[in-house]
Image (cartoon, rainbow, N blue to C red):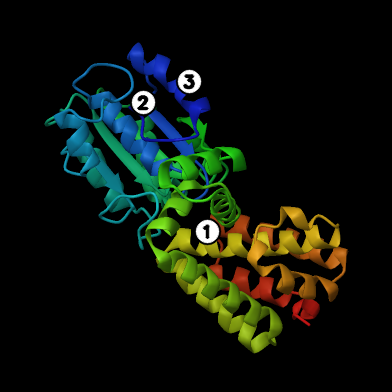
Amino acid sequence: MWQIYGQDHLLRQLEPSLAQDRLSHAYLLTGPPHVGKMTLALSLAQAVNCLQGLGAPCGSCSQCSRIANHLHADVRVVGVTSDQSDESRSSRTVIGIDDIKEVLRSVNLNPFEGSKSVIILDGGESMSTAAANALLKTLEEPPPNVLFLLLAASEEAVLPTIRSRCQVFALLPLSKAAMTERLVSDRQVTPEEAERLYRFSRGCLGWAIQALDDFQVLEQRQAEVERMQEAQDAGLETRFAYANEIASLFGSNRDAARDLLALWLRWWRDLLLIKEGASEYLHNIDQADALRAQAAGLTTPQIVDFIRRLMKTMAALDDNASARLALEVLMLNLPMEAARI
């Protein structure tokens, strides 16, 4: 039984390969934070070790249970926190050569308790050059009974030499209808609350579930919105201080920093929607009044230009540009008219 939801387009490709025992030796799973990359990776680890045979994992045998509880000796995760969840990535932001060397030593041994060793590299875009080169040699001549699963925000963020040796699977955010149905049926929330969570989460089910389980998630989002508005209202000194805050966060928790920049992107997208008379599609529907006030002080070209600069900054950070420099330049280009009126 697959634990992943809303990725049927991928499962339709995986299931025949599993049934015929013809999986690739390496997969690159891409998508935004909380979309389910780690969930799919662990489900695949269960599937290749399940005692019930080839196909979808049963979820209840000893192999599936040990993998679900992060106790399996043959399933190794590099680059995430000890709970190994898709919702809580590691403070480690670089997978170094020593990490890869340790992994490669283990894959040359036979599986200890299962039928296949599984290596999950959480943050495939964050490998150092030396680490990537070491991994590349193994991907070119993979040992038997080993499955590599690389997780990354996007295919483009991974070195071309690495991604060319992997089969790429892109996980997609859920549609509004799919997420609403899931949350209403499984979590007993109202359709209105489900739609609000859909807008906040950008269709990433993991974020919505986390918000339902932990009220601090929504409190943190509100605090981030207020801090963003404060920076937009302020002069360069405050904006640079804010840029340094994000840069520090990027150094300690890359996914959290990506989430914060995604919040900025959704905010400026909402400003553009208001200028174009499409307020019904706002992500930050709870901030509609503040958005309308800010949009009144901006022109459409200003908004479009800053969105482009923001997207370029996010791409540069994925390419391991200097976070502090990139974010300070972004703040320099933030329209002074961005202040709310």
- Looking at marks 1 and 3 on the same chain, the residue that comes earlier in the sequence is marked by 3
Give the percent coordinates (x, y) of residue 211. Answer: 44, 58
Return the x and y of residue 178 as percentages of the image width and height. Answer: 55, 37
Which residue was labeled with disc 1?
320
Q: CA distance from mark 1 to mark 3?
A: 34 Å
Tell me if mark 1 has few (under 14), some (14-19) or many (20+) residues whose alpha carbon lies within 10 angstroms of its own: some
Q: Nearer the viewer, mark 3 or mark 2?
A: 3
Q: Quadrant of residue 140?
A: top left
Mark 3 nearby-residue class (10 Å; few <14, some 14–19, many ≥20): few
Q: CA distance from mark 3 to mark 2?
A: 18 Å
Residue 95 on image: x %, y %: 36, 53
Q: Residue at x 33, y 41 (%)?
A: 120
Residue 89 found in image quarter: bottom left
Q: Which residue is mark 2?
A: 25
Q: In the rendering, at what x and y percent does residue 280 appear?
A: 75, 54
Amino acid type, label 1: Asn
